[in-house]
Image: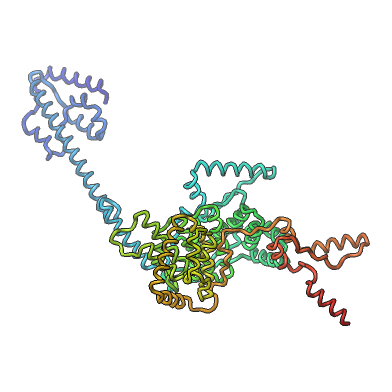
Amino acid sequence: MSARALRKVLNQQQQESSLSTTANINLSPENDSDSSPDSPRPFTNPFDLLNDQDQIQVRDNDSSDDDVSSSSIVINEDNKKNISANVNNNKKSKKKKKNKKKNKEVSSSAGDMGSIDDILGGLSVGGNSSVGRSRVSEKKVENVNGCKTCVLQVDPRFLNAENELRRIFGSKVVSSFEKSNKAGSSRQGRPGRRVSVTHRKTVMVTPSEHWPRWDGSLSMELLEEKNKDRKGCNYFRYVPSATYSLAQRQYEAFQASHDLNGIASVLLHHPYHLDSLTTLADYFKFSGELQMSIDATAKSLYALECAWHPLFNPLNGNVQLKYVHETNQPIFTALFAHMKNMDRRGCHRSALEICKLLLSLDSDDPKGALFCIDYFALRAEEYKWLELFSEEYSSDNSLWLFPNFSFSLAVCRFYLEREEQLKENETKATSSDLMKQALMLHPSVLKKLVAKVPLKEQVWSKIVNHSFFATDDSGSASLDHLINIYVERSYIIWRLPELSNFLKDSALSVIEKMEINRNEAKDWACVRQEAFSSDKNEYSQLMVSEFSDSIPTIPPEHLQNLMVDPRLAQMHNAAAENQENIPVVARAPPREVANRNALAVLFESLLPWADYGPREDDQENGMARDDQD
């Protein structure tokens, strides 16, 4: 109802009340009781509607209409004073009603808040957040104690190298670099209409736009669920399809003939054949095309991740892909190559996460990830995690007995002490004690480090020539192999001045200690012999060159001979020569070896068609036999 219509109705009622003499308005205290909290519907004065029209609109329409219709009021001039008093009383009652509604709203909101607090308190998320966090942390601790590989849980945020590059160089620099690469690739591309392909979102790598669509040639099956020896670990295996098996047979045929063109033709029809991608990645690496090698490795990882089982979640560290299954071996090869590529790009945290993933997939560690995970942790400055890993990871031997962990834990404690992150009441050994212990346990490491880094101060010649550090042999073939791997992998961190001085001071302290007590060297020799008691090299499957940063390259003119089998080219030449009635040479002339790359000659000598002619000794023996005859 508008204000004008309400005012007209009130004027008509005033005129009728002046003519009527029997109109009386009951203003007794009983009417005040209607406005009391006990009454179900309080008395409402229609004059208040003019002043409080905005508040009337907020109210319920039904209740306001009932109040107006039920209050038929006839006003008399003799009762104007009483009406004003009634208006004041109604205003007071209305204020009481408003206060009552406010109190009800406050109480209801308080009740709702109380119920919300109770619910959130039950979920350990609400008001008492410290209790909830403590409960969550207790559950995490229980999970840590229950699962052996929980320390190898992978953080998916750091798996992508582009994210780490953005943190290092800034998002603007990385975005401009990516735009320039896309512009260059679009200029080099073939003219024509480009078809956009929607790729799956993967965790390990980001698929490129020019990659073909995933063909589904691989899948994964669940072999065993929850082994008793390892709690909560599921065992899986990759399963190839019929088309993939056909491509594999073609690849093996071309591999036997060393035909890289044939291997490339396999990828034309089966773009995600893993062995072909691995072969081309190695070829591009040796030829110096590192970006193409990285792209081939990333494409292999994309195919392997697209084939994951719904229950396969390697980020939690509770799944196993045993290396003994031949179909599982490509993922280990691809992850190891991808880890080294990330390290060369300077993405050490990404390399650390990939190394954790590689180590968690098979507890037997077929690729030797345990002997480089400490290096990536130091380069990524994950010092606390490295100490936690050395304490909780289960292995046949204590990790501090391995040469890489003996020295890396000392370096880790050295940086933690510099950052003042160790507590005053902590009873752990100091970095100096750990370094002395590492030098006394593995004294042959020092001489190899000094030669590899290299450390050219005069004091190092005095240290290396000491009788305790002069030997290169540790007495165990396995330990010598692990020492060579550690020196090849981690020598670069010892070029830092603070670490080289730290190593020098510790070595001088060990020399002084050995001169005082010579029997201590024998004690450490007994520990070393007991830890590595095998006479055979138990780690012979791990090549030292696989842990090196240097990449051996072969000139492209020498790699061209590896692309096509020369016997096939000779057959085509023979057919052409027969048409021209030219005699065919049955055997290709021997290749010259002098003034050539030794590594190229080595690879070429492995080919079945390589011919370098008879040896000089054979020629001399043949001439001698002819003379005797």
Quadrant for the C terminus in the image = bottom right
Residue 495, position in %: x, y?
50, 56
| Frontmost residue, 105 versus 259 | 259
The residue at 46%/55% (across/down) is 497
Residue 458, position in %: x, y?
50, 60
Q: Is residue 62 left or right of residue 16?
A: right
Hey, which residue is sitting farthest bottom in the picture?
629
Residue 284, position in %: x, y?
65, 56
| Frontmost residue, 104 versus 435 | 435
The quadrant in which residue 304 appears is: bottom right
The residue at 33%/58% (across/down) is 422
The residue at 30%/53% (across/down) is 125
| Frontmost residue, 62 versus 340 | 340
Hey, which residue is sitting farthest right in the picture?
581
The quadrant in which residue 265 appears is: bottom right
Asked if residue 119 shows in the view, the reply is no
Quadrant for the N terminus in the image = top left
The residue at 46%/69% (across/down) is 402
| Frontmost residue, 142 versus 244 | 142
Hey, which residue is sitting farthest left in the picture?
29
- Looking at the image, is 323 positioned above or below residue 73? below
Asked if residue 287 shows in the view, the reply is yes
The color scheme shown is: rainbow
Q: Is residue 167 left or right of residue 41?
A: right
- Tally of marks: 0
